[in-house]
Amino acid sequence: MTEPGTVLITGPTRNLGRHAVLAMAGRPRRPDLLLVGRAGRDLTAVAGEARARGAVVHEIGCDLSRLADVRAAVATARDLLAAGAVRPLRALVANAGVMSPDTRRASADGYEMTFAVNHLAHARLIGDLLASFTTPARIVLLGSNTYHANFWRRLLGVPEAEWADPVELARPATGERPPGLAASGVAYSNAKLAILYYAHELQRRAGAGINVSVFEPGWMPGTALGRGAPRAVQAMSRALGRVPGVSTPRRSGPLLAAMALDDRWAHVRDGAFVVKTRLTEVRPVARDQERERRLWEATAELLDRAGASR
Ligand SMILES: NC(=O)c1ccc[n+]([C@@H]2O[C@H](COP(=O)([O-])OP(=O)(O)OC[C@H]3O[C@@H](n4cnc5c(N)ncnc54)[C@H](OP(=O)(O)O)[C@@H]3O)[C@@H](O)[C@H]2O)c1
């Protein structure tokens, strides 16, 4: 069994991320934890809860919609590792996510918010920390089945991805009126398809001993992901969240923790897609080496551009 070392997780402040943190902190062989989230009461609260379970925890304040913040978070994580304040870095869980209700909204760097937080911020974080892992190590990204349509998602009006060049996906919408909920859903599904493409390419480029996987926690209606949606939609989501059998952060959080820590998942690599506890083949649309290569190149271009404009 590998020494659990340190796990860095983004989006630890609520729902899935928070429950994953508490599950990791509650294990007998618990890892040290680097919690990367927006500074404030929620971050301090989850750090406190994890410490109360016996974990060594460091809060790293970071707004993922600011790439300068992401760079600063990387510097802090590296300093903590170099100083021996935490054990070697063995896993990174890129959990934070957002579904911006208005695709005209831009990140601090001028990119469409959903694409910026779900994909670009994590690409910066992971790229800049790649040399800091101690192998064997794992990178767990958060995917979503919404990248493709099925009967239920069609019925509920959840749009599938409509892929375009990543530079286009990163461009905020324009116009006087908000493009609407459907556009916001498409942007979310595109960001999650980007994560699958990125995971496949990352595995080809990461050093030996770093395994990349993508976790799908199951539909957890009522989390803060839909917090920008109209009140009626949010109320319906909360109600659906109480339906027996539907996934919840409390149930899926420990499954995400297992992806980062359990021997069961140690062999999983190549951006393999795990839906809760089941290794699942992705749809053909999610395997496309040409799109994967282009996403890698465009991501580097977008990250460089943001760095240059500071
Ligand atoms: N809910 C579902 O049904 C579902 C299904 C499939 C996949 N997922 C994925 O699972 C992950 C967790 O989802 P969830 O439902 O737990 O979402 P959530 O309740 O909205 O929590 C999202 C987390 O991301 C953080 N975050 C968002 N924007 C941020 C920013 N700019 N800077 C720093 N942190 C930021 C939030 O921090 P704050 O507390 O500061 O806002 C929060 O900790 C996401 O990647 C999501 O796409 C969810």
Image (cartoon, rainbow, N blue to C red):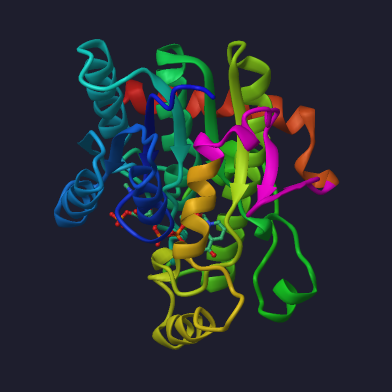
- Give residue 225's quadrant in the image: bottom left
Q: Percent from the top left, x then y, of residue 177?
A: 44, 72
In this view of the protein, can residue 108 be seen by the observer?
A: yes
Using the image, determine if residue 75 lies above or below residue 148: above
In this view of the protein, can residue 173 be seen by the observer?
A: no
Q: Residue at x 59, y 70 (%)?
A: 182
Left or right, residue 263 beside residue 86:
right
- Quadrant containing ligand 1: bottom left
Left or right, residue 103 beside residue 52:
right
Q: Percent from the top left, x then y, of residue 123?
A: 48, 30
Q: Is residue 272 magenta?
A: yes
Give the magenta range.
259-283
Q: Percent from the top left, x then y, of residue 249?
A: 46, 63
Q: Is residue 7 magenta?
A: no
Q: Nearer the viewer, residue 248 or 171?
A: 248
Q: Percent from the top left, x then y, of residue 187?
A: 56, 56
Q: Nearer the viewer, residue 28 or 309?
A: 28
- Give residue 32's quadrant in the image: top left
For the C terminus, the image quarter is: top left
Using the image, determine if residue 147 lies above or below residue 135: below
